[in-house]
Amino acid sequence: MTSTDVLIIGGGAAGLRAAIEAARVGVNVIIASKAPIGYASSSMYAGGGFRAAFEGYTPERHFEETIIGGKFLNDQELVRLMVNEAPERLLELKNFGVELHVRPGGVYVHGDPPASGLGLVKPLAEYASSLGVKFIEGVMAIDLLVDDRAYGAVFYDINSGEVRAISAKAVVLATGGYSQLFLRNDNPIRVTGDGCAMALKAGANLIDMEFTQFFPLGLAEENMPTWLFPVVFGRLVNSQGEDILKKYKINVPLPIAAVQFRDLLSRAMWIEISEGRGVDEALIIEVAEEIEDNLKVLSRMAKSLIRILKITKRRVRVAPLAHFTMGGVDISINGETKVPGLYACGEVTGGVHGANRLGGNALTEAIVFGARAGKSAAEWAKNCEGKSADPTVIKKYEAQISSLKNGSINPKELKFKLKSAMWRKCGVIRNKADLNELIKFIDEVKGGAREIRASNRIEVMESLEFNNMLIIAEAVALSALLREESRGAHCRKDFPNQRDDIWLRRIAV
């Protein structure tokens, strides 16, 4: 059995930063990940921008904008710590080989689109490796090992088909969010809420699960990925040719509306499409001029994506998509969870963003709290004894996986049904009837989960992911049903107003 001092599950920016900090404390560290470390993570596909107090942008302004953006539901202690520590933590990335460019209000890293975050995660992975951090790739965490504390995790080895345990004195979850719950999303395919599900099963709390950030302009062209569309100047119209910005009194150009009024624009688009004024479940961007001329005023990322996707026509279909999840594991300022020895950092956590995320805060959160969680986990590990998993635990999971051969339903089919239901019933605009139908559907699908047939190792992984998605889908739906108001990214058609007198509080699962 493999053992270590600190086990980090997830190999994106948060997990890598946690690994570096833990290794600097002087303990043995393992990062375990479904995908190659640093790759296929949301960090890799992020735009590479960090919000922080640089060049006239103060910590106090950063704090205020984050709280206002989160509709005052943020954990203000977490936010205060993040804005105060961010400048030092971000400049420190230079020591790890990350090429930073400072600008007013933050820093950014260079990388080739669409994987712009590669300029961040690749140097972090190389630096972590140089410190002796061990990488274990191609393994999916099934469950945490927990008694009176967390002491490791059980994994499915996607390459060999074996079940294995890694024992550890401390565990850090850095598995990312759960946007793959929704049919339309721009997240890597393996971001299925695994960490949130494992934490909940282990006894930790989840918070703010009803808050999913939707981006309005996601590609909806046939045979193209559902990426964020490189925002261009032009008109957004419905099937009747109506200008959506004018119709909904969004009095700014489209590129600004897509960023600064993303909630309002997403809702407007959702209404148009749901009421039958869409074009194949989408709206149309009429580009103001030929794409190549438009490239002159677009960002480097936008130019690259347009060329990669070979977008050369002037009418492009777009629709909202799930982009970021504000909810997740409830943590302290040091990344501690309710479970002793279990820590979390990055998008797997909740609290920092409140009801909506301010642009640029995702990567900042990952770096600041990755460092804190890594250090805290290492210090905990230095002061406790290790323990090993009981062999009967491994046999239990082996039997569970072996039973998957006896079913009849393909896990991809169940995933598609769940994602479709989440999109239709718990998407941009929600209501009581839809949410109740969704919760009933989730209960019914739980029965189908017992009939899954996995005939190869990839299907076993898909089955395990689906089980996690079911758990998190229920948490999201129940939280969305309970919050009878509209706040931030959570919009209820039947409760359209923000109710601070009743709902200026957080929902825990």
Image (cartoon, grey):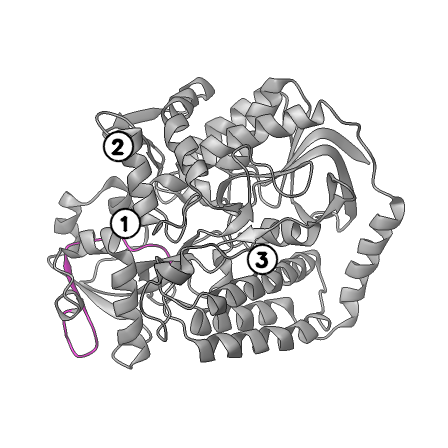
Q: Is residue 204 left or right of residue 508?
A: right
Check disc 3: other Cα within 10 Å, few if <14, some if 14-19, many if 20+: some
Check disc 2: other Cα within 10 Å, few if <14, some if 14-19, many if 20+: some
- For mark 2, what is the residue? 105
- For mark 1, what is the residue? 307
Q: Nearer the viewer, residue 71 or 233?
A: 71
Q: Residue at image x 17%, y 47%?
A: 295
Q: How far apart in space, not on screen, are marks 3 and 1 (Cα)?
A: 44 Å
Q: Nearer the viewer, mark 1 or mark 2?
A: 2
Image location (x, y in percent) of residue 271: 29, 74
Of callouts 3 and 2, the N-terminal one: 2
Q: Nearer the viewer, mark 3 or mark 1?
A: 3
Q: How far apart in space, not on screen, are marks 1 and 2 (Cα)?
A: 29 Å
Can the viewer see residue 422 in this picture?
yes
- In the rendered structure, which amino acid carries the disc numbered 3? Val
Q: Residue at image x 46%, y 32%?
A: 367
- For mark 3, what is the residue? 509
Residue 493, by quadrant, is bottom left
Of callouts 1 and 2, the N-terminal one: 2
